């Protein structure tokens, strides 16, 4: 498996004209972090404390200074819409269709382009078999033996059934037929784009110890790449001792009593130690400064 960061949101030249328009100077040199801060400050005219000028809000007497501080408050207060302005595009190469079937379940804020097995022939079948702590050497050996025979069979059918035809339409039709006997672990490539709000959710859910092993490995790589590009937008996320990326800003409240817990140390869905109820996300919306 390989994961490549292909593209990300950048500020255009006219962004500097906008800075002059609102009389604001960004402190961060990182464009994704700056864009999220801009979007948040625009919502409340919180470029600076009220001073009677048109671009200040009479309701605002104090503002958070600095990019990390401002974005930290945005994330902590649940104001996730401003994160949707930032996008990242990744290529995942040599992954299985087990991986892509799970990846494309994330729909909101995402776009996908995947290698088509209707058009691309399986002349050299490659299958992704990740390691697993519960996998025995005998089971892996038997699986590889079965796949070796399947690979020979697919190559033989491809050579005798598809190769003789000249018509692209016929070859496409037969290629689509032959893919039906390929295993779901067949190696493939996919490009996907996700906005920052969606990506943060994907990183947390897909690096969980309960996630499928291959997608967990991929999103651990993605999390590290994103952190390098926009540290303020990832400031609350970290990998715990089990490799799960969790937020230090998240806290949980019991559905049946007043008990509250903060991560690390608790997880969504855990049983409350006081009454046995379920721990749910506690929506903290403290906005003393905006």
Image: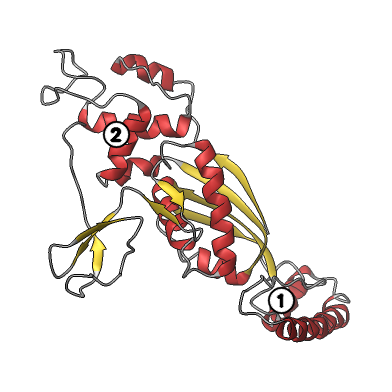
Above-or-below relation of 1 to 269: above
Residue 267 horizontal side relative to residue 3, left or right: left
Q: Locate residue 145: give its quadrant.
A: bottom right
Q: Residue at x 58, y 60 (%)?
A: 217
Q: Which mark is nearer the camera, 1 or 2?
A: 2
Residue count near mark 1 (Cα–Cα under 10 Å), binned few <14, some 14–19, many ≥20:
some
Above-or-below relation of 27 to 273: above
Taking the image as drawn, is residue 143 in sight? Answer: yes
Q: Residue at x 50, y 32 (%)?
A: 10
Residue 276 horizontal side relative to residue 21, left or right: left
Near-viewer residue (275 or 93): 275
Q: Residue at x 34, y 25 (%)?
A: 66
Q: Locate residue 61: give its quadrant.
A: top left
Q: Residue at x 76, y 75 (%)?
A: 170
CB contact under 8 Å: marks 1 and 2: no
Determine which residue is flagged by label 2. 40
Determine which residue is flagged by label 1. 173
Percent position (x, y) of residue 252?
Answer: 25, 59
Separation of marks 1 and 2 at Cα, in angstroms: 51 Å
> Which of the two discs, 1 and 2, labels the residue nearer the N terminus?
2
Judged from the image, the secondary structure of the residue bearing numbered disc 2 is: helix
Judged from the image, the secondary structure of the residue bearing numbered disc 1 is: helix
Taking the image as drawn, is residue 39 in sight? Answer: no
Near-viewer residue (173 or 125): 125
Percent position (x, y) of residue 155?
Answer: 84, 78
Rendered-image quadrant of the C terminus: top left
Percent position (x, y) of residue 7?
Answer: 57, 41
Above-or-below relation of 29 to 209: above
Residue 25 horizontal side relative to residue 43, left or right: right
Rendered-image quadrant of the N terminus: bottom right
**Figure coloring:** secondary structure
Near-viewer residue (144 or 266): 266
């Amino acid at each position: 498996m390989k994961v490549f960061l292909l593209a990300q949101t950048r500020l255009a030249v006219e962004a500097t004209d906008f800075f002059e328009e609102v009389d604001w100077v960004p402190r961060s040199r990182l464009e994704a972090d700056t864009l999220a801060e801009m979007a948040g400050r625009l919502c409340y005219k919180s470029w600076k404390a009220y001073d009677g000028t048109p671009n200040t809000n009479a309701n605002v007497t104090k503002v958070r200074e600095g990019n990390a501080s401002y974005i930290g408050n945005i994330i902590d207060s649940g104001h996730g819409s401003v994160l949707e302005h930032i996008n990242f595009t990744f290529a995942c190469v040599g992954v299985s269709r087990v991986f892509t079937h799970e990846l494309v379940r994330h729909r909101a804020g995402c776009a996908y382009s995947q290698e088509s097995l209707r058009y691309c022939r399986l002349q050299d079948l490659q299958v992704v078999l990740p390691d697993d702590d519960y996998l025995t050497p005998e089971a892996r050996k038997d699986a590889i033996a079965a796949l070796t025979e399947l690979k020979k069979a697919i190559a033989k059918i491809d050579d005798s059934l598809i190769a003789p035809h000249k018509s692209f339409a016929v070859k496409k039709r037969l290629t689509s037929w032959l893919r039906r006997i390929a295993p779901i672990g067949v190696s493939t490539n996919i490009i996907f784009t996700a906005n920052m709000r969606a990506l943060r959710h994907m990183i947390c859910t897909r690096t969980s110890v309960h996630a499928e092993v291959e997608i967990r490995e991929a999103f651990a790589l993605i999390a590290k790449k994103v952190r390098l590009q926009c540290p303020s937008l990832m400031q609350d996320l970290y990998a715990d001792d089990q490799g799960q990326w969790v937020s230090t800003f998240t806290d949980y409240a019991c559905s049946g009593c007043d008990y509250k817990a903060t991560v690390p140390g608790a997880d969504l869905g855990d049983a409350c130690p006081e009454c046995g109820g379920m721990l749910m996300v506690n929506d903290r919306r403290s906005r003393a400064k905006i």
